[in-house]
Image (cartoon, grey):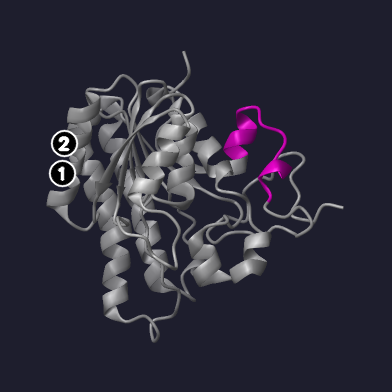
């Protein structure tokens, strides 16, 4: 039997990017996926909706449940979790992928954007996990995954974009606390973060455009790392702050060049990766000849 066959994933922000890539990886095993995201209508600046994501998931071999959810709204999250459990008979995995980003210092980020980032990133992830615990407690191998960085509390990660960093590190603080809280229940809570930038709409529209997209890895590296987490026994892996390629290397992956968007471009390192993070054998940031 495939690793995630029949398992049910609840993924926030799964209409595109890393969230969708994680959904598709699970779908190839025959998993059930609830797509909990805001995008129900096409957006000219952003590809994908919850309905196009559902079509892709089912084409990949899974079962999909598209749900319009704003993770800032407690009632919407609670209802979506209940609908997912009712349709698929439970929930095995929660992926807190939904995120808001606005880069800038304190003089350029207004409080409306500050509030949005904290409500979506830190509060939304905490609340979704809190509300999912009663369902996860009934699962055979329950996992919660935060797409958030290691807790490397250095000034350089905050000074240029304090508001955003506070919001992302808030997710990681939730990992630290919830992993301890839920350990005795057998519910794993881990964080996963990319070593390099990932080719997503955020990178293209907000961070660096086409040049940075070429210097990025594909979302599939995060999906494969997430998959490796989900098939591990929850009691054996919790409270960890994992880097995508390092965790994959620990699980037998040796070819990381397949994840490059453009092998002729050097890779760009992402925010928040600690300086002492080991580099897997064979991984280089240089452009390939």
Q: Residue at x 59, y 58 (%)?
A: 197
Magenta-colored span: 246-260
Q: In 3D space, how far apart are the residues under numbered discs 2 and 1 (Cα atoms)?
A: 6 Å
Let me know if residue 254 is in the magenta part.
yes
Residue 254: % across, % down = 71, 33
Residue extending farthest to the top is 1
Using the rendered image of the protein, determine whether residue 220 is visible from the camera's viewpoint: yes
Q: Is 111 or 178 nearer to us in this picture? A: 111
Instruction: Tell whether 12 sits left or right of 19.
Output: left
Secondary structure type for disc 1: helix
Badge 1 density bin: few <14, some 14–19, many ≥20, Cα 10 Å: some
Q: Residue furthest bottom?
A: 107
Q: Where is residue 77 shown, x and y percent of the image?
A: 19, 47
9 and 254: which one is in front? Answer: 9
Image vertical order of residue 286 relative to residue 182, above or below: below
Q: Residue at x 40, y 45 (%)?
A: 53
For the residues bearing labels 2 and 1, Cβ distance under 8 angstroms: yes
Residue 70 percent coordinates (x, y): 24, 56
Q: Name the residue furthest right.
A: 289
Residue 119: x %, y % from top left: 26, 62
| Residue 109 in the image: above or below residue 266 | below
Q: Can the viewer see residue 156?
A: no
The local crowd at label 2, few if under 14, some if 14 to 19, many if 20 or more residues have their Cα within 10 Å, is some
Query: Can you tell which quarter of the image residue 167 is in?
Result: bottom left
Viewed as shown, does residue 154 lie left or right of 50? right
Q: Which residue bears the numbered disc 1?
A: 78
Task: Label 2: state its secondary structure.
Answer: helix
Which residue lies under the disc numbered 2? 82
């Amino acid at each position: 039997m495939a690793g995630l066959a029949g398992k049910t994933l609840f993924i926030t922000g799964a209409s595109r990017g890393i969230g969708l890539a994680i959904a598709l990886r699970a779908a190839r095993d025959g998993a059930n996926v609830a797509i909990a995201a805001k995008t129900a209508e096409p957006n000219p600046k952003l590809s994908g909706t919850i309905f196009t994501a559902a079509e892709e998931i089912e084409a990949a071999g899974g079962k999909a449940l598209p749900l319009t959810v704003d993770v800032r709204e407690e009632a919407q999250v609670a209802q979506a979790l209940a609908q997912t459990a009712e349709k698929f008979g439970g929930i095995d995995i929660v992926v807190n992928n939904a995120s808001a980003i606005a880069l800038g210092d304190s003089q350029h980020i207004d409080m409306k954007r500050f509030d949005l980032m904290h409500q979506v990133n830190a509060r939304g992830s905490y609340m979704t996990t809190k509300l999912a615990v009663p369902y996860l407690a009934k699962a055979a191998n329950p996992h919660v995954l935060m797409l958030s960085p290691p807790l490397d509390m250095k000034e350089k990660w905050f000074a240029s974009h304090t508001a955003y960093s506070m919001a992302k590190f808030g997710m990681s603080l939730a990992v630290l606390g919830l992993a301890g809280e839920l350990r005795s229940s057998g519910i794993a809570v881990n964080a996963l973060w990319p070593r390099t930038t990932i080719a997503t709409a955020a990178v293209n529209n907000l961070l660096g455009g086409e040049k940075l997209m070429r210097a990025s890895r594909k979302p599939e590296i995060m999906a494969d790392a997430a998959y490796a987490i989900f098939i591990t026994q929850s009691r054996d892996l919790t409270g960890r702050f994992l880097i995508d390629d390092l965790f994959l290397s620990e699980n037998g992956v040796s070819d990381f060049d397949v994840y490059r968007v453009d092998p002729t471009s050097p890779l760009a390192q992402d925010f928040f990766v600690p300086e002492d993070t080991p580099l897997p054998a064979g991984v280089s940031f240089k452009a390939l000849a």
